[in-house]
Amino acid sequence: MKMISVIKKSFLLQIRDYWALIITLISAPFFVMIYWVITSGTSTTYTLLTVNNDKSIQNSTYNAGNELLKSFAIMKYEGGSSILNIKQIKSIEDGKSILLNRDADVLLKIPEDFTKTILNNDSIKPSVKLYGDISNPRYSVAAIMVFTAVDGFVRNITKTENAVVLNEEFIGNSSQRTEFELSIPGIIVFSIVMLLFTAGMIFIRDIEAKTLSRLKITRMTIFDYVGGVTIMQLFVGALSVIITFCTAVALGFKSNGSLWVAILISIITFLSIVGITLIIVSFCKNSIIFLTAGNVPLFILMFLSGAMIPIPRTPLFTIGERIVAWNDFLPPTHAVIALNKVATQGVKLSGVIYEIAFLSVLTIIYFAIGILLFKRKHLRMA
């Protein structure tokens, strides 16, 4: 009987703390839905760039390079979705730029003598060359799939084992980086994302302590208040990034790019996180609700942006030649890509203009929505 009483009491307490119950019940299904949206509910399709320089031999229209590309197009998963998304481009340099922007996973160059070497049936094996950014976790899987497909295509024609010679070239400085060094940009972005809780608790404590109620009778504006908290959080965020960076350096990390460009990217990312925090706080009345509900956007920003684990990029539309995916609407996504370019590839400011511009636009949007909601929920004059 006593146990039944405890069960009843626990049930009532659980119902009263309904936010924790709701978050607990919907968190996993929510992430299932988000991941389904990002991947379109199918297996990952890898983007393959191709430069086909192959030439047909005299008195023949057969071109092995063209036939190889056709074989790529029919590669499917058991569910029917394509394994490779093939895009033919004009030059290797164009391909390297696309790879660096992570709008593709691997680049295949088919040489001029591909058909000739296959049909000659002599001791010389045909060769292909793969290009990729080793800091992109998707490259390794895509490269294995492409080479396996090329080897199978040539083997079916020549009836020989180990039919193809693979040459591989890593773009930029990615091949010179350790796995530890490649992980640091994402961890730095993670340290910025954690600003969500430090900033959020300041706003929540002012709400709980009725500080905002007292401030409303002064001449303080929403911009005074939010601006003051934001500036303070910039110092906290800067300290977090400095500690993270110094720890990484002490353990062997080296950045190939400009520190000032990395700082600019970090500052804009700080501001975007504060904007997102304002949105979350606008729907929270106390710290318990904030600490419970805040875990959902935290996990979204951490994992679905690619800061901690690689996430497939399913295209929605393009801006010029740049692909825009679902997770591009999360500010840390662009911060991770930009910091990887700076730290790993050593690119200058001009090489991350797109990421900084997209990140800045998202920051303005999130901040504007955050200020509007926060003012309406917590600073409305009676």
Image (cartoon, rainbow, N blue to C red):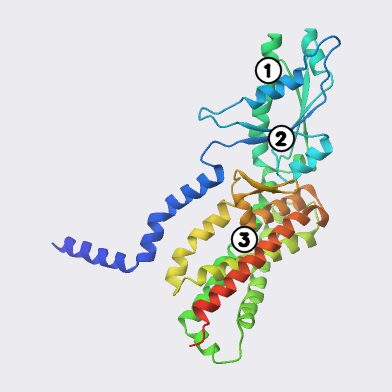
The mark found on residue 106 in the picture is 2
Quadrant of res 259? bottom right
Give the mark, 2 or 3, whose residue is nearer the N terminus. Answer: 2
State the CA–CA distance, disc 1 to disc 3.
46 Å
Query: Mark 3 = which residue?
Result: 191
> Is 156 situated left or right of 97 in this image?
left
Query: Could you tell me residue 98's position as x and y percent?
Result: 76, 42
Q: Nearer the viewer, residue 336 or 84?
A: 84
Q: Nearer the viewer, residue 298 or 108?
A: 108
Image quadrant assignment for residue 219? bottom right
Nearer the N terminus, badge 1 or badge 2?
Answer: 2
**What residue is at 69 percent from the left and 52 percent from the top?**
251
- Mark 1 nearby-residue class (10 Å; few <14, some 14–19, many ≥20): some
Residue drawn at (74%, 59%) of the image: 357
Q: Residue furthest left?
A: 1
At horizontal 59% and vertical 31% (from top left) the residue drawn is 82
Q: Quadrant of residue 135?
A: top right
Query: Compared to 141, does 58 lie above or below?
Result: above
Residue of label 1 = 153
Q: Residue furthest bottom?
A: 218
In x, y percent, where is residue 114? 80, 18
- Do tag 1 and tag 3 residues touch (Cβ < 8 Å)? no
Q: Is residue 240 visible?
A: no
Out of 249 and 186, give the one closest to the viewer: 186
Secondary structure at badge 3 equals helix
Residue type indicated by callout 1: Phe
Please name the residue shown 66% across and 18% down the image: 152
Where's residue 378, x and y in %? 50, 79
Q: Amino acid at mark 2?
A: Val
Q: Is residue 335 visible?
A: yes
Residue 21 vs 80, above or below: the answer is: below
